[in-house]
Amino acid sequence: MTWIKPGAEFAHLFHTFESSAWRWECQGTYREPVEREPLQAWRDGHPTFEFMQPWLDQIRAQTAEGKRFERVRMMTNPPTEYLRWMFEFTHLNIEAGEDIRWVGEEHARKLGAPTHDFYIFDDAQVAILHFDDNGVSGAEVTDDPDTVAEHRQWRDRVWPVAVAHNQQFAPTTRSP
């Protein structure tokens, strides 16, 4: 496995894959610095999602090239404030071209889904994400066949039972 840092090294993964990027997202809260002010604005009743624009632009450009972005987000029970906030703007990701689905925490655990976030790129490379109080602290990236196969199996268990965002019952989106 190769350790890569957030920033340019991590972003490189999204510019070099050829056909698909699949993500398992299972943290109830993410602490990305770029999200702090928008989350607070949402809490204050003034949601703003401009911080998403670079990602949305990238998704639009790459899906126009025929690349696929898919992810499953695990919904905690009860939903965290962060997930309620995220649920409110997921439609922007979908409009840009991502296929985002949700699975309940209990269901994910019954399926044996892992407790770590990861990406699978082109069914050939896995990036296991690590976090600290400032969001993504780095990722372990590997093309080891056994590791890739294990993560593909988790994907193949979760993806078919996850519910498309537009079919999901929305959690209460108001902040407490």
Image (spheres, rainbow, N blue to C red):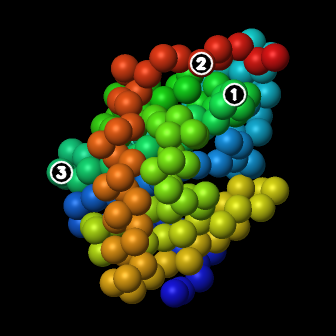
- Please say if the residues under marks 1 and 3 sit with CB atoms less than 8 Å apart: no
- Please say if the residues under marks 1 and 2 sit with CB atoms less than 8 Å apart: yes
The one of 85 and 53 positioned closer to us in this rendering = 85
**Local secondary structure at mark 3:** loop
Q: Which mark is residue 66?
A: 3
Position of residue 130 relative to residue 164, above or below, is below
| Residue marked by disc 1 | 78
Q: Position of residue 72 (x, y in %)?
A: 44, 44
The answer to which of marks 1 and 3 sits earlier in the sequence is: 3
Residue at left 59%, top 61%?
A: 116
Q: Quadrant of residue 17?
A: bottom left
**Local secondary structure at mark 1:** loop
| Residue marked by disc 2 | 171
Q: Position of residue 119 (x, y in %)?
A: 44, 62
In the visual, does 44 lie left or right of 58?
A: right
For the residue marked with disc 3, what is the amino acid? Gly
Outermost residue toward the left?
Answer: 66
Q: Residues within 10 Å of mark 1 (few under 14, many from 20)?
A: few
The answer to which of marks 2 and 3 sits earlier in the sequence is: 3
**Local secondary structure at mark 2:** loop
For the residue marked with disc 1, what is the amino acid? Pro
In the visual, does 43 lie left or right of 128?
A: right
The CA distance from mark 1 to mark 2 is 9 Å
The CA distance from mark 1 to mark 3 is 36 Å
Where, quadrant-wise, is the C terminus in this rendering?
Answer: top right
Q: Position of residue 9 (x, y in %)?
A: 54, 74
The CA distance from mark 2 to mark 3 is 32 Å
Q: Residues within 10 Å of mark 3 (few under 14, many from 20)?
A: few
Q: Nearer the observer, disc 2 or disc 3?
A: 2
For the residue marked with disc 2, what is the amino acid? Pro
